[in-house]
Every structure is written in structure tokens, then in C-alpha cells.
Image: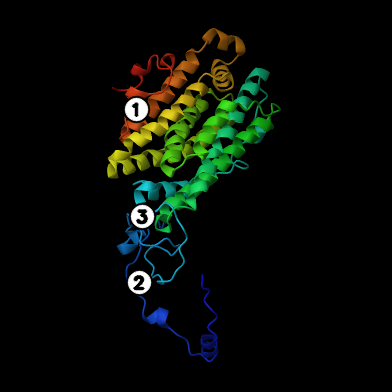
Amino acid sequence: MTVDSVDSAYLERAQQGRFDWGWLEQTRSEWGVRARPSKVGLTLRDIAVGSYGDVPDHPPRRTMAPRGSEVDPDVPDMGYTINEKSEVWADNLLDLYEEAVSRQWSATRDIPWGELPELDPDLEHAMCQLSTVLSEVEMVASDFPAKWVWRINHDFVEAKMFLCTQVMDEARHTEVFRKRALANGGGLGKAKAVVERFLKLILDADSYDEGSALMHLLGEGIVLSLFRAGELIAPSPVEKKIFRLCMQDEARHVAYGTMHLRYRLERDPSLAEDYHGYLDKGEEIIGMLFSTPEVVEPTTLLLAGSRKAAEDLGLAGADLLRGRVIAEYLQRCEYAGLPRRGRLKLPSQMLTGLDAQVPA
């Protein structure tokens, strides 16, 4: 590799006021193409004007040069491995990024921690166990984008920027649930191997396609459904606010994953079977999660309100939540162009009553 030497002659001329000015007089930028702010400010969509808004399907270079700039011919190759737009793109990316940066919240200041009430010990333990699982699973949705974002071609900078907001969102989710477990005297509960196996499956994914399908569509989709239920079964207004704020973040990630898969399959339908294979593996572990006491019973106890009421209720509440989780997952797959209804890898007893929740 050659390293450019210092241009001593230029420095000497510049000291005398004899500047080059080539960058000023010979630029080929789109002079006069002006981005105008919309009513909410200057958004990514507002600056997607002229050639600057054209995102190439196959970028000609692998550099960090801003898309649309005039690039030196001898710029170094950054070695990006994701160089096809459809590998990371989604039609809703620009809007999701703007929403993400405008709706950031603080797990320190925006949760009324001082208003946490004393709970029945069983309910406190249930909330702490649920918080333990959530603080565990949420961080993988930060680790996964961080693993891949530096491999993505810089011409897809909007996708990289959105994934960076997801890293921050999920770090905050881990923070808020860890804080909830420690804020009211209960402490952290049990971490189960089956949960870790699913997280490892995501992190060990051989491709962004595989990891995104397992995380954005399956894993985060399940967590989104759980957040929705969490707002309903929360034992106090404090937890309700936690679940509500996390839910708005998670909805963005799932919306990206669903629309990304749709974009990917519209451009290469032959990938559908690969995606089915990824989800086959993920669903097998999800089926185990649905039969893990540390995952199933905390929500049942919070829903019922007491251990005795939970025992009287049995798995009716858990079945209802699981049915909703599966129904929403199948709807997302359908919308993305990957119908899974006929090939779910879940035990048949977990699909009882599903027809009532999922349109044919």
C-alpha cells in the first residue's frame, strides 16, 4: 500500500497565498439543487433530491465517500461485504429514522421511578423475572446490528443510520428492564439456556438475511406482542409507561424488518425458501420458549393478579397471549410475501384456537 507524501511544494505556495482552488472551480456537484425543509424540519426525505436521492442497487465503490460526492479514483477500498441494496433496504427506512431520532427517551428521567408502589411479593417476583428475560433478549437486538453495520456499503448510509438508532433503542430497553428489576427490592431472576440458544442463533447467523429474519421478524415481533400485553398486565402505572415507551421503539424495528423482507423478496423471489429455512430453525426454539416456566408463568401471574388466581386460570391466559403472538407473526410474514401458515414449526397444542385469530 502506498501512502501519499506531504505536498511540501503546495504548503510553500499556500503560505504565500497562492492557493490551488481546483476544488472550488472544477467541482461537478449539483450546484443549485436545494433541499427544502418540510413542516417538521429538514428530513432525510427532504434531502433526497437530484442525484443525491438515487441509491444505486450495486454501488461502484466500497468507500465511505458520501453518496453523490466527487470521489478520487484512488480512494482506498473499505472492504464492505454488503454491497447490494436489497440486502438491507426498505421503503420505510427514511421515515423510520426520522421517527427514531425524534422519539428518543431516557430510562433515567422519563420513568417515574419514585412512584413505584410496594407490590405483593409474588407479583414483584413475577415482574422481576419478566424484566430479567427482557433485559437479556433486548441486548441481542443491539449486538446484531452492531455486528453488521460496519459491513454495509456507505452508499446505503440511511440503512446504517437507522440501524444505529436501533442499537441505542435496544441498549435503553436493556437498561430500563434491568433498572426495573433492581428498583423495587426484587432483583434479577433466572436466565435460561433455551433463551440463550435463540440469542446465539441470531448472533451466529451466516448472513444479514438470516439474522434479520430471526431477529426483526421473529424475535422482535414476539417481544412487540409481549410489550403490548405488558401494558395491559402491568402491576402499576410505572410499568405501563415502560412497556408503552419500549413498544413504540420495537414497532419501528419490526416495521423495518417486515418491509425489508418484502423489498428483498420482491427483487429476488428465489430467496423465499432460504428465509423459510431460517424461520424453521427459529420457530423450533421459540416453541421451547413457549413451554419454559420462567417465560410463561410471570405473565400468567401478572395477568391473574395472584398465585391462586393464576392456578385457577391455568394456561388460559398464556394460551391467549401465545395465540396473539403467533397470529401477529403470521400476519407479518404474509405481508412481507413469505406465508408461513402451512409450515409452522410449533407443536400442534400451541396452535389451538389460532384459526380464530388469523384470517385465512
Q: Which residue occupies 32% across, 59% down?
A: 54
Q: Amino acid at mark 3?
A: Arg
Q: Which residue occupies 45% across, 56% down?
A: 80
* Helix, strand or loop under label 1: loop
In the image, residue 5 above or below residue 238: below
Q: Which residue occupies the extreme top position in the image? A: 312
Q: Give the class, few, some or many, for how many residues have Cα within 10 Å of label 3's Cα (few <14, many ≥20).
A: some
Of label 3 and label 1, which has the lower sequence position? 3
Q: Which residue occupies 53% across, 34% down?
A: 199
Q: Amino acid at mark 2?
A: Ser
* Helix, strand or loop under label 2: loop
Q: Which residue occupies the extreme bottom position in the image? A: 16
User: Can residue 207 be seen at all in this image of the molecule?
Assistant: yes
Q: Give the class, few, some or many, for how many residues have Cα within 10 Å of label 2's Cα (few <14, many ≥20).
A: few
Q: Which residue occupies the extreme right position in the image? A: 185
| Residue 340, numbered circle | 1
Seen in the image, is 279 located left or right of residue 166?
A: left
Q: Which residue occupies the extreme front position in the image? A: 1
Give the CA separation, mark 2 to mark 3: 19 Å
Q: Amino acid at mark 1?
A: Arg
Q: Which residue occupies 52% across, 76% down?
A: 4
In this view of the protein, which residue sits in the foreground, 279 or 50?
279
Of label 2 and label 3, which has the lower sequence position? 2
In the image, residue 189 above or below residue 36: above
| Residue 29, numbered circle | 2
Give the CA separation, mark 3 to mark 1: 33 Å
Residue 299 position, x and y percent, is: 55, 21
Residue wearing tag 3: 45
